[in-house]
Image (spheres, rainbow, N blue to C red):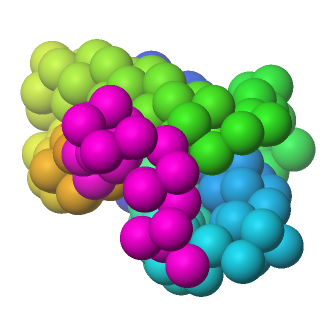
Amino acid sequence: MKGSPKVIQTLNHLLAGELTAIDQYFIHSRMYEDMGLNKLYERLDHEREEETGHADQMIKRLLFLEGVPDMSTREPLKVGKTVPDMLQKDLDLEYAVIKNLKAAIALCEAEQDYETRAMLVKQLEDSEEDHAYWLEQQLGLIDRIGLQNYLQSQL
């Protein structure tokens, strides 16, 4: 089924964001693992897998719409140096993804591509209600209980 060129272009833009998130969560999860922060490692590794699922959905949808998935484009990685820095950089990435998803959902509505819209609405829910919320909680915990107590809780 030939899809809207605008939707195809937007899906490729979103795909770049998902691929960037996969890479950034991959390095951060391995940094947490190296630090012995196993709870953070496990959570970020889970999020990396979820982002891989989102990318897979986008690739399949692009192919269905007779588009060509762009697997080479990425946003610049923002790798943190400390735990709070890593959490903040991941949250900033999620906020950018959320903004882009909302714009893409509006475009799909205008282009009357309701199947792509439904897929993106689910991904928005995952991004807003799951990962961004969790990252906000972690940064809030650091503020409330202090970094050392937080790190100890993540061993």
Taking the spot 49% from the left edge, 43% from the top edge, the residue there is 147
Q: Which residue lies at the image location 28% right of the left edge and 52% below the top edge?
A: 134
Query: In which quadrant is the C terminus drawn?
Result: bottom right
Query: Left or right of 143: which side holds 130?
Result: left
User: In the rendered view, would you say 117 is above or below 91?
Assistant: below
Q: How many marks?
A: 0
Closer to us: 134 or 105? 134
The stretch drawn in magenta includes residue 88: no
Q: Nearer the viewer, residue 37 or 86?
A: 37
Left or right: residue 15 versus residue 128 is: right
Q: Could you say where residue 125 lies in the image, as x and y percent from the top left?
A: 16, 51
What residue is rendered at 32% in x and 31% in y? 143
* Residue 26 makes an appearance in the image: no
Residue 69 position within the rendered picture, expressed as x and y whole percent measured from the top left: 69, 51
Where are the magenta residues, as a range?
Answer: 134-155
Specify whether residue 39 is in view: yes
**Residue drawn at (63%, 31%), measured in percent from left and top?**
85
Within the magenta stretch, is there residue 142? Answer: yes
Q: Considering only vertical position in the picture, is 7 above or below 151?
A: above
Residue 133 picture quarter: top left
Which one is nearer the viewer's eye here, 60 or 53?
Answer: 53
**Whole-percent x, y for residue 90 in the image:** 54, 39
Q: Where in the figure is residue 1, as x and y percent of width and height?
A: 40, 57
Instruction: Name the magenta segment's main secondary structure.
Output: helix
Q: Nearer the viewer, residue 68 or 134?
A: 134
